[in-house]
């Protein structure tokens, strides 16, 4: 049965390759520094191609390689800028981004690539306690502008003091300018370490999200289907698990 499943997958992929071979689109994929999902190897705010790594980056590169679709990959900031570019420019896409009800009709989606826990963190030594979202209203919460961690809290009536870069929140937390930092369980340790700051302490997990590759609406359905089928095959083969375990 497993052999037949793999054989069917091969035939499906060959059919999809054939359907896009006459008009392969070059995709322009954008990302940002959001370790360990996507990050500049040299910890800069601009990088291209081999200068970018991370778990989502490796998964996306493998999708593109197997799908035989031409692409370029650029890391830059801020998130709001690359989000707008992917929304407005033909053949553009961005990752890692959460699929929300608001965003769903705006893009075409490939994923999920990887899961992520959204948390709030406190400064080491702080006695603050958080047992619910309602508790967050008592504190100054810092978050990354445009990120799902901030958007989720704001949509539920939690005021968020937003920063243009997430490392600024780590700095503000250490300096006592905010009480809590809304971030990611996997990203926060990388961000603090890169900024040369003590590790913040996770205090409350408020949700979990799946991260996707979001593509401009003009990207053809055949290309999106090919990429999704490639990712699905990678999961069945255990390739996504292999890549994920290198980082998380």
Image (cartoon, grey):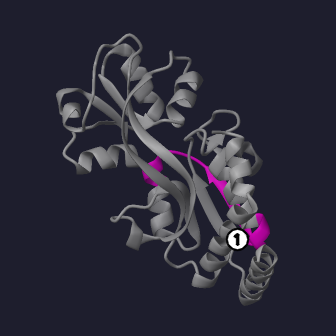
| Figure quadrant of the C terminus | top right
Query: Is 164 a magenta residue?
Result: no
Residue 74 on the magenta segment: yes
Decide if residue 103 is in sight here.
yes
Residue at position x 23%, y 32% from top?
136
Residue at the (57%, 30%) spot, across then down: 190
Residue 55 in percent (x, y) is at 66, 47
Image quadrant of residue 132?
A: top left
* Spot occupied by residue 28 in the image (x, y as percentages of width and height): 63, 64
Up/down of 56 relative to 117, above or below = below
Q: Is residue 177 left or right of residue 41?
A: left
Residue at the image point whose x is 50% and y is 31% from the top: 188
| Depicted 128 relative to depicted 154: above or below | above
Left or right: 15 with respect to 84? Answer: right
Quadrant in the picture for residue 25: bottom right
| Count of all numbered marks drawn on residues in the image | 1
In this rendered view, identify the residue nearer to me: 139 or 43: 139
Name the residue that disc number 1 marks: 230
27 in relation to 176, above or below: below
In this view, the residue farthest toward the front is: 1
Q: Which residues are magenta?
A: 65-81
Q: Secondary structure at mark 1?
A: helix
Q: Nearer the viewer, residue 132 or 143?
A: 132
């Amino acid at each position: 049965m497993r052999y037949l499943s793999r054989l069917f997958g091969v035939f499906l992929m060959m059919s999809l390759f054939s359907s896009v071979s006459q008009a392969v689109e070059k995709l322009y994929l954008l990302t940002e520094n959001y370790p360990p999902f996507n990050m500049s190897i040299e910890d800069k705010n601009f990088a291209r191609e081999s200068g970018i790594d991370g778990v989502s980056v490796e998964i996306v590169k493998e999708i593109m390689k197997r799908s035989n679709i031409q692409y370029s990959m650029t890391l830059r900031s801020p998130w709001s800028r690359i989000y707008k570019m992917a929304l407005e420019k033909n053949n553009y896409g961005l990752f890692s981004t959460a699929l929300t009800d608001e965003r769903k009709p705006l893009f075409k989606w490939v994923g999920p690539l990887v899961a992520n826990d959204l948390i709030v963190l406190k400064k080491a030594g702080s006695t603050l306690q958080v047992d619910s979202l309602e508790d967050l209203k008592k504190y100054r919460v810092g978050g990354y502008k445009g990120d799902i961690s901030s958007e989720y809290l704001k949509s539920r009536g939690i005021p968020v003091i937003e920063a243009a870069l997430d490392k600024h929140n780590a700095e503000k937390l250490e300096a006592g300018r905010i009480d809590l930092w809304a971030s990611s369980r996997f990203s926060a340790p990388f961000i603090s370490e890169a900024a040369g700051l003590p590790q913040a302490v996770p205090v409350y997990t408020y949700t979990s999200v799946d991260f996707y590759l979001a593509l401009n609406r003009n990207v053809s359905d055949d290309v999106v289907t090919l990429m999704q089928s490639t990712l699905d095959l990678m999961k069945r083969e255990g390739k996504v698990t292999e890549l994920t375990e290198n980082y998380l």
